[in-house]
Structures are given as C-alpha cells and as structure tokens.
Amino acid sequence: MSSYLELSKLTKVYPTPKGPAVIVKDFDLKIANGEFITLIGHSGCGKSTVLSMVAGLNSVSAGGIFLVGKEVTGPGPDRGVVFQSPCLLPWMTAYENVKMGVDQVFYTASHVERREIAEYYLSIVGLSDALRKYPSELSQGMRQRVGIARAFALSPKMLLLDEPFGMLDSLTRIELQQVLVDLSRRDRKTSLMVTHDVDEAIFLADRVVMMTDGPAAEVGDILEIPFEHPRDRKELLANPEYYALREYLITFLEERSHIRPSRLTVEDEGKILRMPEPSALDEAIGQ
Amino acid sequence: MEPLLHLDHVSKSFGGQCVLKDICLSIQPGEFVAIVGYSGTGKTTLINLIAGLIAPDSGTILLNGKPVRGPGPDRGIVFQNYSLLPWMTVFENVMLAVDQVFPGWSPAKKAEQVEKYLGMVKLAPARDKRPGELSGGMRQRVSVARALSTEPGILLLDEPLGALDALTRATLQEEILSIWERDKRTVLLITNDTDEGILLADRIIPLSMGPGATLGPEVPVPLARPRDRKSVNHDPGFKEIRSRVLNYLLDQGALQKTRLSLKLRLPDILPEDLNSPRVSRRHPLRRGEERRETVEVG
C-alpha cells in the first residue's frame, strides 16, 4: 500500500558555536491514509521538531517529507496544525478566529457556506454557545477547542497536533480527547500527534511511535494499538490488553528510550532490557 | 485513634455561589490521602480552608482536636506555583520559614535544619541560587523543603506537580514518597491526576463536580509499597481502583453537560489550493451532496 505521508531519512541539524548539533537523525515513518499516529518520547527528544518539519515551519536538513506524493517544502493549509497553546488572535471572537482560515481556503464558496463551515466545527467541539466570545473570556480548555475547530475547518489533508493537551489538567484532557474522537467519527483524518501522555497515546492512536532520547533522536520502537474505532474509554479501561500496552510504553520511556536500535552492535544486543511482549502479558493476565 | 484532621460538614460559598458543600473528612496520623477532582471544583478552596487562609461558612475543621482559626506552622503547604521569594536564594527562602517557626534556635541549629531538608530534596548543590535560576522541578523541591523544614504535623500539597512535565513529575512523585516513608508525615494531596493519587496515596477521594462540590465515595488503595509505575499495570487491584476513580469522575463530567440538539449543515465543498494562482471559478468544487446532520453537543 502506498503511504499517505512518508518521512524518509528525515534529519535536523542546528549549527551551534560548538559545531553542528544533530537533533533528529534518519527518522523514517510511513503513515497510511486515515491513520492516527502518536509520537511519544521524553521532553526535548525532538518530537516537536519532527512535527514542525512536517508542518513546513522548520526547514529539513536532510531527507524528505512527502504528503500524497508531493514533497513538503513550506507551510500550507493542507496540513492543519494544533499547537500546544492555541495561538488565537485575541482581538477576534472564537467564530472569527475559525472563519479567518475558512475564508482563505474556501474563497470560491459563498458567504453562507463559509459561515456554515465555521459554525459546524465550533458546534461539534462544544462551543455553540461561545461563538461570539473572545479568547480572554474562554478557559484554557475552551481555547484549545477553538484551536481544534480551526484546524478541522480547513478540511486539511492531514492534522498535526503538537502536544495539544499538554497544558490542560488530566481530566480536561480526557474531555478534549473525546472531542477528537467525536470529530474523527465523522471524518477520519490522517493525523500525527506528539504527546508524552501514555494514556492519550493509546486511546487515540492506531500506532504509537516511540522516539529515543535526543540528541540524534530516531524511531525507537512502534506499537500497534489493536482496538476498534470508535473507542470507548470505559471499555478500554476494563480491557486487560490496554494495561499491557500501557506497561509496554511506560517501560520504554523509563528504561529503553536511550537505546538506539540503529546503532546497536552484536554485543549490545544482550544489554537491551527485555520488553514485555503484549501478547505474553495477556496470557499472564489469564485472558 | 483520634484523627489528626477532622472536617465535619464544612461548606463554603463565594458571592452566593456554593463552592464546597458538606465536606466530611477524617485523616489519621501518618496517612497519605489524595483528593482528585476537576479544575475549578474547589480543590484549592478546600486546602485554603484547612490551611486557615479562609474560614468556612458552616461546619468545623479540627486539627489535633482543636478548631482551626487561622494559618499556622503546624500545617505545611506546597502550592502549585511554588510561591518562592524571587530575591532570596534557595537557602534564604527555606531559612525564612525556619526563622519564623523556631525563633529560639541558635543560628547554627537553624542552618543545620535548612541544610538537612535541602539535602532531603537533593538541592544542596543549588543552595545559593535564586528561584529565577532554577527549573520548575527544582523550584518545587525548594517549596517542599520549605514546607518540611518547619516540621508540620500535616503536609498539604495543592497540585504540587501540576505544572511539571511528565518525567520531572515522576521523579518528584518518587521523592515525595520516599520522604513520606522516611518521615511518616501525614499528607493530604490535592491533584487532578488519578494515577498520581493511586501511586502515592493510602486512600483516594474523588471530588464531585461543582457548584456545591462534595467528596465522593472514597477508594482505599491497598497496593503494596513501594509501588512501581510499570508493574502496577498488571496488578488487577490497580486496574480496579483506577477504573473506579476514573469512572466516577467521568460520570461527574458527563452530568455537567447540558445536552442540546442543534441542526447543523456542513457544505461538502473542497478547499482551494492556495499555492496555485487564484481561480476565477465562482463556485467551489463539490465532493457530492451536502451533508445534513443533527448532532448532540455538550
């Protein structure tokens, strides 16, 4: 199957007074149409660098990014980005913030149609009562809802989410993850999300890509999340396999994120901490 | 055994809006209790009441059998925003508290006390730094050292790790635990992170949604210590506790949503390519029929 988004040997090098610093090295990833990928790793490992390169906001030092067969060279509305802080324009209402982008990419559509698009997405994210409110009148969680609506309203080819819920408390985060699930139930978008929340990664993703620690971060391991969409959090919490996956990811972050698979020699093999096999764990649980 | 802290039907309103209602809570000496709830439900108000920073409208708060009338050094507080004095060094920030609480001690003894607690939170090398030179995690350590240095009977932690990233949070959780295990201090932790509560506490009590928030059914955490955040994942007890607390909180969150039905129309049109020259077409390209749907939104 041909991939929708392909990252090939993606590398980012920053010049420093002490010589070039390699942040991301030979990062390879293929994402299929409609797939939801979460990138997980420690703070500072280069997750956001990868995402901002895909967004076209950061230049690529080596390697390439291909979205639907076309190389990504700069930012564009075909990739909707949700940032950690929603970056809304403070002098515009929630509606105007969303409408601004809609006016750009749907410039051939009628005024009514553009209004309908903005109102549709703001309502789906639960802001039908707050269309005319300014960002300063909204809570942190509500502002991030506007940010999500703004990204979806552009009908982008794919979504890029850079720790969108990192600044929210864990319960608000759960609510907003549900918003994403509700939106993708209508329109399953290819998505790449950066997070360091293990539960968030499992709940949303089809595959979790684990990144090794920087500098020169690369793909450490990939975990398939086998649960059917749409997912129900309560069912998931009752599923023993969920906890096996959770343990796998936590173990990676705590013990193995510094091991780089591409630089292993034969003698290193023995030193790798053994990771629990999700299937083996399942048996241990008695499923 | 007489509880160290006892709250009996405590209620508090602000400007006619009831924030906390009928809070009943007993904490035994040496216990680690966690209260988990959504932001904005009155968790901080609860800590402020126990700290004596505000007075309840009704009900009583007893500490060691005596009513709480104001703040005092018998309760050490760690705030989410650290609350350190920026013009003082780490050492001076902690010394300020020790000076106030133990005015009779000799300067050498006070300094020894400060050093002891800075060592406990592994900050001895940073003693002469100012808060501005420290990371969030290190600032919070100073705050913990300051709270512990006055040797309070109970430690009140108000979302102490909420502003930290996941890795620093995990490290500090372990440090709080090791201090608690060594010192056997009574701790009341306020948090929005269920996992943090389960990993640290003997008991978890969810706080219901406001207005008029009250404590929900408490969940004992009988998991053996020390608890490991990896291996607890295949402990059936952990899963059961986790889903009980989370389900209660999720149900509370769902209760608050007002269901309304809206008729929405999403025109099924395609965005234009902004990288190519603007087209003079008067109509957007359509995928097919327009979509009409009725959605329920919270």
Image: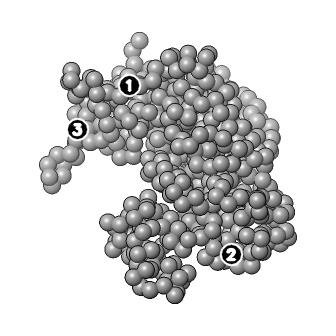
> Residue at horizontal 70%, vertical 79%?
B70
Left or right: residue A29 compared with residue A193: left
Q: Nearer the viewer, mark 3 or mark 2?
A: 2
Q: Amino acid at mark 2?
A: Leu
Which residue corresponds to mark 2? B53
> Residue at horizontal 57%, vertical 28%?
B234
Which residue corresponds to mark 1? A274
Q: Amino acid at mark 3?
A: Ser
Foreground of the two, B218 or A85: B218
Which residue corresponds to mark 3? A61
Q: Amino acid at mark 1?
A: Arg
Location of residue B190 (image quadrant): bottom right
Left or right: residue A147 compared with residue B276: right
Foreground of the two, B238 or A144: B238
Residue A106 x/y as whole percent: 53, 37
- Classed neighbour count for the residue bearing mark 1: other residues with Cα under 10 Å, few (<14), some (14–19), many (≥20): few
Q: Report helix, strand or loop for mark 1.
A: loop
| Real-space CA distance between mark 3 and mark 2, rounded to the nearest whole angstrom | 55 Å
Residue A215 in sight? yes
